[in-house]
Image (cartoon, helix red, strand yellow):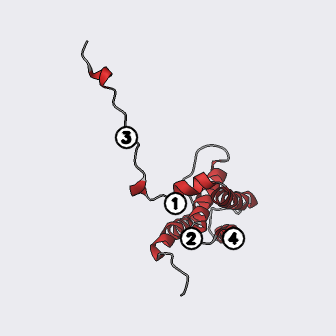
Amino acid sequence: MRGFQIPSYRWLYPLGILVCIFFASGESEVAGPGFAGGDKLAHFFAFGAVATGAVRLVDRRRAVWVVLAVSLYGASDEWRQSFTPGRSVEMADWVADSLGAMTAVCSYVLWPMYRRILETPLRLRRRKPRIENPALDVPL
């Protein structure tokens, strides 16, 4: 396809998280944080990570579609849980999924420093050289 220059391996990050979410939704019991509301926090960050990985692959003008797609996946995930014994469907989980996606996409689109950090290859992130002070190396 013309103009489509994204390497296919960059889709592995969001797809890998979606696969993990899919398999976790099919389990009757899932380990989660041991505090009240911790599962909502897990939903928020998991779907935020998916949205972050996906929004990096599309034109920023289409970011709203990423939020919509991740939110729809969250809704389908909740619907799928209704068929799993021992699991319940909660609207609050879907809201946490959607808010996580929206927050991640808005952070990426509207916060240039965050975007720059995510887009800088690891091999280019070098520490600044430490300035040596010869006066500190003199024995007393």
Residue furthest right as drawn = 91
Residue that carries the numbered disc 3 in the rendered image: 129
Q: Residues within 10 Å of mark 1 (few under 14, many from 20)?
A: few
Badge 4 amino acid: Arg
Q: Nearer the viewer, residue 126 or 49?
A: 126
Q: Which of the 4 image quadrants contains residue 122? A: bottom left
Decide which of tag 4 and tag 3 comes sooner along the chain.
4
Residue that carries the numbered disc 4 in the rendered image: 61
Query: Quick one: SS at disc 4?
Result: helix
4 and 1 marks in contact (CB < 8 Å): no
Nearer to us: label 4 or label 3: 3
Residue 57, label in figure: 2
Alpha carbons under labels 4 and 3: distance apart: 38 Å
Measured as percent of width and height from the top left, residue 15 is found at 53, 70
Residue 133 lies, with reference to residue 73, above or below; the image says above
Query: Quick one: SS at disc 1?
Result: helix
Name the residue at 41% across, 55% down.
124
Inspect this view and state whether residue 18 appears.
yes
Residue furthest front as drawn = 134
Residue 119, label in figure: 1
